[in-house]
Amino acid sequence: MNKIQPVNNYALIKLESESEKNIGGIIIPRAAQENVTQGEVVALSPGSFDEVAVGDRVIYKEMSGTKITHDKVEYLLIPVSDIIAKFVDVDEI
């Protein structure tokens, strides 16, 4: 078994599943969606920025990175600097 370890300040992002449900519960296939610009960080290169950690759901720049498939799962390998936001839990809006 092997895994992908990013280097040189790159992050490995697991892309959203093949289809996503929106708030109304309608299933939209990935092919019909606009470019997906969010996913989950599954690996970081050693010494990457402190603001992002493995497990964070993040938003990244559109058209960033290189798509790869490993063990039938789609990932995106992007520079950590292309991550522009992350989802955080809050008590109130």
Image (cartoon, helix red, strand yellow):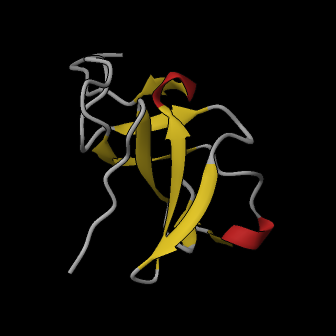
Q: Specify whether 86 is left or right of 21.
A: left
Q: Is residue 25 visible?
A: no
Residue extending furthest front?
8
In which quadrant will I find the N terminus? bottom left
Q: Residue sitting at 56 percent across and 74 percent down? A: 18
Q: How many marks?
A: 0
In the rendered image, residue 75, in percent from the top left (x then y), is placed at: 49, 61
In the rendered image, residue 50, in percent from the top left (x then y), is placed at: 25, 17
Instruction: Report the front residue among 81 and 58.
Output: 81
Instruction: Report the front residue among 63 and 45.
Output: 45
Q: Residue sitting at 25 percent across and 21 percent down? A: 90
Q: Residue sitting at 41 percent across and 40 percent down? A: 11
Rendered view: 7 above or below 17: above
Q: Specify whether 86 is left or right of 43.
A: right
Q: Is residue 57 visible?
A: yes
In which quadrant will I find the C terminus? top left
Rendered view: 11 above or below 92: below
Instruction: Report the front residue among 69 and 86.
Output: 69
In the rendered image, residue 76, in percent from the top left (x then y), is placed at: 54, 54
The quadrant in which residue 32 appears is bottom right
Q: Specify whether 24 is left or right of 49.
A: right
Instruction: Report the front residue among 54 and 8.
Output: 8
Q: Specify whether 64 is left or right of 58.
A: right
In the rendered image, residue 73, in percent from the top left (x then y), is placed at: 44, 75
The quadrant in which residue 29 appears is bottom right
